[in-house]
Image: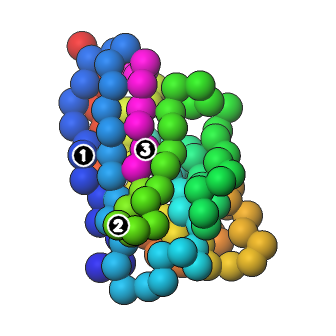
Amino acid sequence: VPLVESGGGLVQPGGSLRVSCAASGFVFTNFVMAWFRQAPGKEREFVAGISWSGGRTYYADSVKGRFTISRDNAKNTVDLQMNVLKPEDTAVYYCAADGAYPPSYYSAQDYDYWGQGTQVTVSS
């Protein structure tokens, strides 16, 4: 399994949570990485993306200023730190890897590898 997420769970509104993704089986530094999420009854949507070196990051407007994506190329991991969580952030969060150049970041159909997802529930 090329991507494995961890760290999901239940958190109260206003709280924080960090989800992580461990990559294996491919050259991690050749891929841009991203987090997507999918809530029940909704399409999968882009949350955050990060370039090969980590020097550039991209965020959906709905999470900008609250979420931070980071990667560690020595450990082949990518994390998503989520702060000031809201009930509308409840979803299954997926890690994804895109080996294309140039990458699109925002389109789920362009990604080559996906994790199995981790549930994040924001509720009091």
The residue carrying pointer 1 sits among few (fewer than 14), some (14 to 19) or many (20 or more) residues within 10 Å by Cα, namely some
| Residue located 73% across and 64% down the image | 104
Look at the image and say whether residue 73 sits in the magenta stretch.
no
Q: Which residue is mark 1?
A: 7
| Image quadrant in which the C terminus is located | top left
Q: Which residue is mark 2?
A: 75
Could you tell me which secondary element the residue under label 2 belongs to? loop
The residue carrying pointer 3 sits among few (fewer than 14), some (14 to 19) or many (20 or more) residues within 10 Å by Cα, namely many
Residue 115, by quadrant, is bottom left
Give whichever of 46, 83 is nearer the camera: 83
> Residue 66, position in %: x, y?
52, 26
| Residue located 60% across and 63% down the image | 53
Residue farthest toward the right in the current orientation of the protein: 102
Specify whether 83 is left or right of 55.
Answer: left
Could you tell me which secondary element the residue under label 3 belongs to? strand
Region of the chain picked out in magenta, as a range: 79-87
